[in-house]
Image: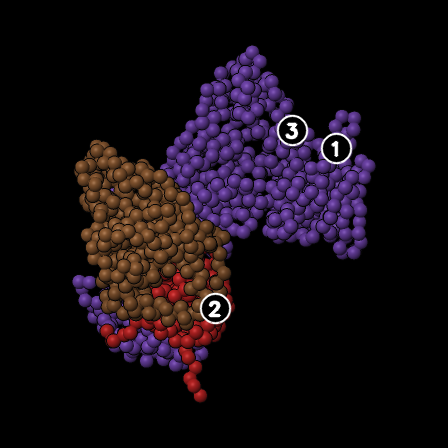
Chain colours: A purple, B brown, C red
């Protein structure tokens, strides 16, 4: 170290928080005698303006170049005092905090023991401070574009907000149309708005927006880079339909040899479509897609004498030569809005979902109720002459929610309200129907929710507290076996139809997203936010944000709110234009590095790579300081000590260990 | 073990255009020692030997080559290096490949199936004060020595290195040619040194190691003989930061041995070269084998077998055992 | 009455979980013995096992490493690396005759102030039982 170290030690009383237990005067006198300590002071509140002023004054007057503040936890005031140093013209990383409050005065009642520990803590801090190096935070420019993954209401809303602020958005949707779960719904609770009526205009807005590039029928392939500078590869799957020529007239679908023979996944298999299709009439984009798993021409190589779709398509949009296309995008931020899956009730075989036609899920009922659904809105059981309208209908709630035995412990949040909504709609559709809801709890917290639930009950829907144990068939009817737990009465309730209020769960392919984006998942499988209270939209990865049901089950208003929050977070990053990256990152000594690559293997962020060193004529490790998060795992693995973490170098830690390990009270150091 | 076959094969190797030189064992000039031999000329292969005296692990020289300035990127590829490897030596090469210490493309491995190498301590006791160079060989599972004009046959258990008695890989796991026939796996003795030692009380274990660590003179011969202790600038010898003080005493020696053993955890191929190199008979392999056993039993990993495996010390499994955690 | 032996323990804590947990113990005014001296690192993955050996050389009677629970590492997997390293280091130390009570590891999350107190109490008690560490302590001749 070329310049002589001059350390200042500042011992805080924190009122009586520290001073009542630790003899601050003794610690200050002790600190003044430590090597390289030029000055030591104590003050009632170091973090107060005059307290900080003391430090600033000493830095200027006494030429101090290292500062030790013995006060509270660095997790509380490290940034405060770093700013103090900066204001006095000293590099902020020349600060070391000695935690003598949370980990000393507050936990030790004995004054002499606490004072001795405080001495040692201060001595270790001074030893470490001497070796600290001034560091600079790097700044890198931010790519002014956002990738939004998922074209449900969360993704659409987020894309609109970001694009509205003047930035480019790439909206990636794996299905042929955007719209997501909300497009499948008939009405929304509690206001009973028609879901399509409020969603469709947003879908059209998103597609028409000049700054939103819609990549539908596309999937994420690879993500690299870091906040501000992500490189993304997206595969645009071949639709075998030229999007520029297709007018969406639908002649092809009508003429397709498989017309009405392919189950529609949008309608959950309740309706049928052709091999060339669009998922629903209001789909955006409106052009058609050929189902490559079903199309006779694509699977068998021939379709009669010629594919009828080709023959009838007057613009000539059908193109069997089309291939997948991989596009590379540069974005500054990523919003993950991939939504959720629905619990598969066949995992609860006692409800007979697989066995009985008249046991359906709530989403299936949504499709049946929808005017654009497979039955054009009528709820009918059976087909042809056997067709009948259900009179007795039972809803079962919490199917796949709050159910440890089914492997999903969480509450899915929306089921209580959608059950109330569906019960209401059924009541409208089937006047005189007797509807009961088997429930364990009703959670109706939300604006207008309790009122709506109350209204539905007043309309005659009976709520019976009990969790059915079994559903079985008796004649042509179904029997729900349940105990009414409020009346302590076992029931066998004969009904025509059972609706299972299935829960929401993480997407089956969430693991793929987690791996590509280096995200984490919480125990319930949903993506993990950075902090459950204070950073519910952020993730552990800077520049990647969460919106909607991919983070936790959510209803539409919450989803839209989170989408707007995610958009605001992404916009904050983008509009700053530059991003600061951590300074306490890892660094390689090329001279001693052997290029063994352990660090490359260990780094969870892919921040280390091996690169040929001209100077040493072999490969050595190279840290990308923007990617490095400063965990130091690589440094601990390096046999030759060539990899070091700034501010946590071997010598920094060894200097602390030397003081803290010694038997004495730190005074002989 | 047909020495002439081996020499002929070495001659062929050296005649190849792509081979720069061959590292092998040469006849020694003193007692039971052999010397490493660097040959460029096919006409000199008669100087090569292979016998129970070839205890040094020649893979150690491969990483030294690494320090020689290589041509700048894009320049013509360098010549290949041929090296004679026993089973354990070949495992060391595999581990070096895993750690990118050597480039497989630049190596030509001459595999030498091995029936065990002598423990210098044991033979010194059998033939005290031998100065004249001794010849040795394997015969029907025993070791024969020609010394002072006499042929002496001794059972392997009496003269071979302890590690060789239960050798798990007598034949090379990686070789470009194998001039001689493979040898059969034969476990002369099941080694229970680690578990036996663990039976002792904690105090007795320390008494043992205290004596051993006090004996160590920190000459670093163990480190230099080890093909996997190849840092050009050893962390433990550095002055800043000083992990160890230079003084030779119980504390620094103990820390040295703990650090050395730890650095070899999941890397040591148990060739025993360190122990044979030690002038004061520090049982280095006891520490190495202890960790090797833990790595195998806990994590199912054995180093030096698969060049494509990730290095053990850079890997983990989320369900690793954690029985001692508070 | 003979004075009770007060062991000196060096603890390496990760910033995000255990150090925060220790802070929480303070905020909650939980009382524990002052024998544990803390070195803060960003992640348990940073802790070179040789730091532990060094702490013993310096004269620590016990060493504690504490980090996030498995699966909760702020850096995703640093604690997994640490778990392997310290499992092996402990085996090595015990094999050479170091009392197994001297070296401990724990998972303490940012919300587990009470657990931190218990861990400290336990570690101190264990080191107290093991007695002063003399085995390969560095003899200091003043420096």
Badge 1 sits on which subunit? A
Question: Disc 1 to disc 2, how far (Cα)?
Answer: 63 Å
| Residue in the picture at 54% in, 13% down | A306
List x then y, in percent, for residue B219. Answer: 24, 61
For the N terminus of chain A, give its image quadrant. bottom left
As drawn, B24 above or below A287:
below
Q: Considering the numbered disc 2 on the image, is that residue within a helix, a strand or a loop? A: helix
Asked if marks 1 and 3 touch (Cβ < 8 Å), the reply is no
Q: Earlier in the sequence, mark 1 or mark 3?
A: 3
Residue A606 as seen in the image, left or right of residue A197: left
Q: Considering the numbered disc 3 on the image, is that residue within a helix, a strand or a loop? A: loop
Residue A362 as seen in the image, left or right of residue A471: left
Q: Which residue is mark 3?
A: A271
Q: Quadrant of residue A56?
A: bottom left
Asked if marks 1 and 2 touch (Cβ < 8 Å), the reply is no
Badge 3 sits on which subunit? A
The answer to whether residue A266 is visible is: yes
Q: Are marks 1 and 3 on the same chain?
A: yes
Q: Quadrant of residue A226?
A: top left
Q: Residues within 10 Å of mark 2 (few under 14, many from 20)?
A: many
Disc 3 versus disc 2: nearer the observer: 2
Q: Which residue is mark 2?
A: C119
Badge 2 sits on which subunit? C
Q: Considering the numbered disc 1 on the image, is that residue within a helix, a strand or a loop? A: loop
Q: Quadrant of residue A379?
A: top right
The answer to whether residue C17 is visible is: no
List x then y, in percent, for residue A576. Answer: 35, 47
Q: Which residue is mark 1?
A: A381
């Amino acid at each position: 170290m070329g310049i002589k170290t001059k350390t200042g030690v500042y011992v805080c009383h924190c009122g009586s928080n520290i001073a009542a237990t630790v003899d601050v005067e003794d610690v200050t006198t002790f600190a003044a005698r430590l090597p390289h300590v030029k000055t030591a002071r104590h003050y009632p509140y170091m973090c107060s303006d005059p307290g900080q002023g003391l430090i600033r004054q000493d830095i200027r007057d006494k030429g101090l170049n290292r500062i030790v503040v013995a006060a509270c936890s660095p997790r509380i005031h490290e940034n405060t005092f770093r700013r103090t140093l900066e204001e006095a013209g000293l590099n902020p990383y020349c600060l070391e905090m000695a935690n003598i409050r949370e980990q000393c005065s507050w936990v030790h009642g004995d004054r002499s023991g606490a004072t001795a520990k405080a001495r040692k803590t201060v001595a270790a801090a001074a030893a470490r401070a001497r070796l600290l190096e001034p560091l600079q935070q790097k700044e890198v420019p931010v790519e002014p574009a956002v990738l939004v993954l998922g074209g449900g209401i969360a993704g659409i809303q987020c894309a609109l907000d970001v694009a509205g602020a003047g930035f480019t958005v790439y909206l990636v949707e794996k299905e042929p149309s955007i719209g997501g779960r909300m497009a499948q719904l008939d009405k929304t609770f509690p206001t009973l708005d028609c879901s399509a009526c409020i969603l469709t205009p947003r879908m059209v807005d998103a597609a028409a927006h000049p700054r939103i590039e819609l990549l539908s029928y596309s999937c994420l392939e690879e993500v690299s880079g870091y906040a501000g500078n992500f490189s993304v590869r997206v595969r645009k799957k071949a639709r075998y339909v030229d999007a520029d020529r297709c007018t969406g007239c639908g002649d092809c679908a009508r003429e397709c040899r498989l017309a009405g023979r392919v189950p529609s996944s949008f309608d959950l298999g309740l309706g049928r479509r052709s091999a060339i299709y669009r998922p629903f009439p209001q789909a955006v984009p409106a052009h058609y897609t050929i189902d490559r798993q079903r199309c006779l021409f694509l699977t068998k190589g021939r379709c009669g004498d010629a594919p009828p779709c080709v023959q009838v398509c007057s613009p000539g949009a059908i193109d069997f030569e089309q291939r997948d296309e991989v596009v590379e995008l540069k974005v500054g931020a990523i919003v993950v809005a991939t939504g959720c899956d629905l619990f598969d009730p066949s995992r609860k075989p006692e409800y007979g979902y697989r066995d009985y036609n008249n046991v359906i899920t709530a989403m299936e009922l949504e499709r049946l109720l929808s005017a654009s659904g497979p039955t054009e809105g009528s709820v009918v059981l059976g087909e042809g002459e056997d067709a009948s309208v259900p009179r007795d209908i039972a809803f079962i709630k919490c199917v796949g929610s709050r159910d440890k035995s089914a492997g999903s412990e969480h509450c899915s949040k929306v089921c209580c309200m959608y059950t109330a909504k569906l019960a209401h709609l059924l009541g409208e559709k089937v006047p005189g129907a007797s509807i009961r809801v088997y429930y364990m709890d009703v959670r109706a917290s939300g604006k207008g929710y309790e009122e709506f639930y109350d209204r539905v009950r007043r309309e005659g829907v009976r709520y019976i507290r009990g969790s059915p144990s079994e559903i079985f068939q008796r004649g042509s009817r179904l029997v729900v076996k349940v105990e009414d737990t409020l009346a302590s009465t076992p029931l066998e309730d004969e009904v025509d139809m059972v609706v299972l209020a299935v829960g929401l769960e993480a997407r089956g392919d969430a693991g793929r997203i987690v791996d590509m984006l280096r995200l984490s998942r919480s125990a319930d499988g949903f993506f993990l936010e950075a902090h459950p209270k204070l950073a519910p939209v952020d993730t552990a990865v800077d520049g990647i944000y969460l919106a909607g049901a991919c983070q936790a089950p959510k209803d539409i208003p919450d989803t839209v709110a989170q989408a707007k929050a995610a958009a605001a977070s992404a916009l904050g990053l983008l509009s700053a234009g530059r991003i600061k990256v951590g300074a306490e990152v890892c660094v390689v000594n090329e001279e001693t590095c052997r290029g063994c690559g352990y660090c490359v293997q260990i780094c969870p962020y892919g921040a280390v790579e091996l690169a040929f060193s001209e100077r040493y004529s072999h490969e050595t490790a190279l840290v990308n300081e923007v990617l490095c998060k400063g965990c130091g795992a690589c440094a601990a693995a390096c046999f030759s000590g060539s990899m070091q973490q700034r501010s946590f170098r071997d010598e920094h830690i060894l200097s602390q260990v030397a003081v803290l390990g010694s038997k004495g009270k730190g005074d002989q150091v | 073990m047909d020495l002439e076959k081996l020499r002929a094969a070495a001659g062929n190797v050296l005649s190849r255009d792509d081979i720069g030189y061959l590292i092998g064992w040469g006849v020694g000039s003193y007692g039971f020692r052999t010397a490493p031999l660097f040959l460029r000329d096919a006409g000199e292969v008669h100087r090569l030997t292979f016998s129970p005296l070839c205890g040094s692990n020649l893979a150690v020289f491969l990483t030294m080559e690494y320090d020689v300035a290589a041509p700048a990127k894009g320049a013509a590829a360098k010549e290949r290096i041929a090296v004679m490897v026993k089973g354990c030596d070949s495992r060391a090469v595999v581990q070096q490949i895993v750690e990118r210490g050597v480039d497989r493309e630049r190596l030509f491995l001459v595999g030498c199936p091995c029936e065990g190498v002598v423990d210098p301590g044991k033979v010194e006791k059998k033939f005290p004060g031998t100065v004249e160079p001794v010849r040795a060989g394997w015969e029907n599972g025993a070791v024969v020595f020609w010394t002072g004009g006499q042929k002496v046959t001794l059972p392997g258990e009496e003269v071979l290195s302890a590690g060789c008695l239960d050798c798990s890989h007598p034949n090379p796991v990686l070789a470009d040619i194998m001039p001689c026939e493979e040898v059969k796996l034969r476990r002369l003795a099941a080694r229970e040194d680690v578990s036996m030692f663990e039976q002792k009380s904690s105090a007795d274990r320390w008494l043992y190691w205290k004596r051993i660590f006090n004996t160590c003179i920190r000459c670093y011969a163990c480190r230099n003989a080890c093909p996997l202790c190849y840092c050009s600038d050893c962390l433990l010898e550095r002055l800043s930061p000083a992990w160890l003080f230079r003084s030779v005493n119980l504390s620094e020696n103990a820390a040295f041995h703990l650090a050395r053993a730890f650095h070899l955890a999941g890397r040591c191929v148990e060739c025993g070269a360190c122990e044979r190199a030690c002038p004061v008979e520090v049982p280095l392999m006891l520490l190495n084998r202890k960790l090797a056993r833990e790595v195998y039993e806990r994590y199912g990993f054995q180093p030096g077998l698969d060049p494509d495996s990730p290095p053990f010390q850079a890997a983990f499994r989320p369900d690793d055992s954690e029985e001692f955690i508070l | 009455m003979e004075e009770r032996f007060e062991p000196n323990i060096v603890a390496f804590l990760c910033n995000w979980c255990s150090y925060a947990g220790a802070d929480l113990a303070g905020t909650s005014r939980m009382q524990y013995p002052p024998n544990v001296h803390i070195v803060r690192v960003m992640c348990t993955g940073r802790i070179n096992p040789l730091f532990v050996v060094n702490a013993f050389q310096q004269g620590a009677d016990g060493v504690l490493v504490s980090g996030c629970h498995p699966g909760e590492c702020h850096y995703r997997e640093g604690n997994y690396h640490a778990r392997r390293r310290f499992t092996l280091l402990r085996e090595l130390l015990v094999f050479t005759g170091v009392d197994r009570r001297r070296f401990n590891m724990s998972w303490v999350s940012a919300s587990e102030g009470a657990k931190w107190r218990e861990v400290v109490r336990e570690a101190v008690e264990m080191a107290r039982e093991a007695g002063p560490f003399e085995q390969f302590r560095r003899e200091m001749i003043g420096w």
